[in-house]
Image (spheres, grey):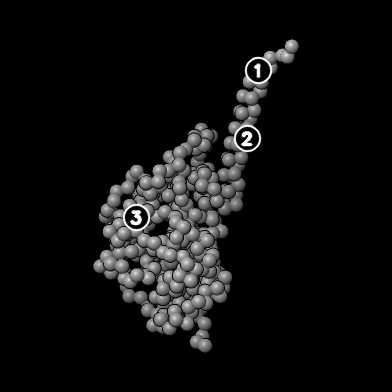
Amino acid sequence: MAKDRSGSVRPFLAWTARMWSAVALTMLVGGCVLLQSRSGSSSSARTPKDAVVRQERAECGRLTEKEVKKRDYLPPCPATPPGLHGKLKVREDVSLEEAVQDLADGVGVGGSWAPPDCVPRWSIAIIVPFRDRQPQVGPFLYHMHNFLQRQQLNYSIYIVEQEGTELFNRARLLNVGYLEALREGPFDCYAFHDIDMLPEDDRHLYHCSEQPRHLAVAASNHNYNLVYNKYFGGACLMTQDHLARVNGWSNIYWGWGGEDDDMWRRLSFEDLPVWRFPANIARYRTIKHGPQVVNNKRYQTLKRNTGRYPNDGLSTIKYIVKSVVRHPLYTHIAADIGTPLPPS
C-alpha cells in the first residue's frame, strides 16, 4: 500500500514557498543596493526598464521589508486617474526655494517620482531645453510635479542647459536630453517641453501613444489658438521608436525657430501622423520672458534640409556633458553642444 505523503509534502511546500519569497526579497533589496552603487548614492537612483522596478527605485533605500512585500500586490493605476482637478490655476510667482519646500519630501532627488499605491501605466522623461530662464524654473517645477503626480505617472525631469555664448540651439539640447535620459531609462516615451509652457488642465493626459503627440495645442501667447495645422512647438511627446525612425531632431537650427517645422516634416516622411487633444483641454499658459534671437534663415534652412534627416540628428550630434547635478526636483545637465558651421 502506498504511503500517504501529504503530511510531509505540505510542510515541504510551505518551506519552499518561504524560501523563494526570501530569495525574491533579497534579490529585490539587493537590486536596490546595486542601483545605488551604480549611481553613487540612493538619492540619484534613476528609472530602469521594468515599471515595477521603477516604482521600487523611486523609494530605493527607504523601503522596509514589509513595504517591499506590499508592493508585490499593488494594482495597476487606473486608465483615468481619480485625482484630476480639470482646469488649473497657474502660478507664475513661485520661487525655486518655495517649490522645493513644498514638494521635495515626496520627490526623489533628481526629479523622479512614481505613485506609491499603484503600478504606473507609463514612464516618461520630461526634457526641458534651457538657457537664461532661471526665474521660470520655480513655476515650471512647482506646476509640473503637481500636474504629473495627479496623472499617476512615473516620471523624471531633466533640464538641459546650453553652455557657451553661441546662439541658442533648442533642437540640439533636445537630442542631448533624450540621449542622456535614454542611458538612465529607457522610458516609455519622452516629452520635449519648453520651460515657459504650463498646461492649464490636468485632463490633458501625458500618456504615451503609438502616434507622436503635439501637446501645446492652444497657448495663451497665441490667444489659445493653434498657430497653424503643422505646428509642433511648445511641447510634444514621442516614443523611442518614433525618434529612431526620424533620427531625432535636426542639429542645424541656431537661434529661435525652424526645428519644430523640421520635425513635422520628418514625421510626415515616416508616415507618422500627429494627434492632439482638443484645444479646450490642451490649453497652456505661456510664462512671460524676454525677447529671443530669431533665426532669420530658418525658412531657407528648412527648405534645404527637407528629406536629409537620415544624415542630420541623433546619428550626427556631437556634444560634451560638462556636469550632471541631481537637484531636489530635477536633474540638471550642462552640455557643450558645439558651434554653428561656417556658411558653405
State whether residue 225 is above or below residue 31.
Answer: below
**Numbered tag placed on residue 23 in the rendering:** 2
Which is more toward the observer, 39 or 206?
Answer: 206
**Numbered tag placed on residue 204 in the rendering:** 3
Earlier sequence position, callout 1 versus callout 2: 1
Q: For the residue labelled by badge 2, is the local secondary structure a helix, a strand or a loop?
A: helix
Give x and y (percent) for residue 242: 50, 63
Residue with the most extreme right position: 1
- Residue 165 visible in this rendered orientation of the protein: no
Mark 1 lies on residue = 6
Q: Are marks 1 and 3 in contact (CB under 8 Å)?
A: no
Earlier sequence position, callout 2 versus callout 3: 2
**Which picture quadrant has residue 199?**
bottom left
Give x and y (percent) for residue 301: 45, 81
Q: Are marks 1 and 2 in contact (CB under 8 Å)?
A: no
Q: Amino acid at mark 1?
A: Ser
Q: Are marks 2 and 3 in contact (CB under 8 Å)?
A: no
Q: For the residue labelled by badge 3, is the local secondary structure a helix, a strand or a loop?
A: loop
Residue that appears at 53% across and 72% down: 313
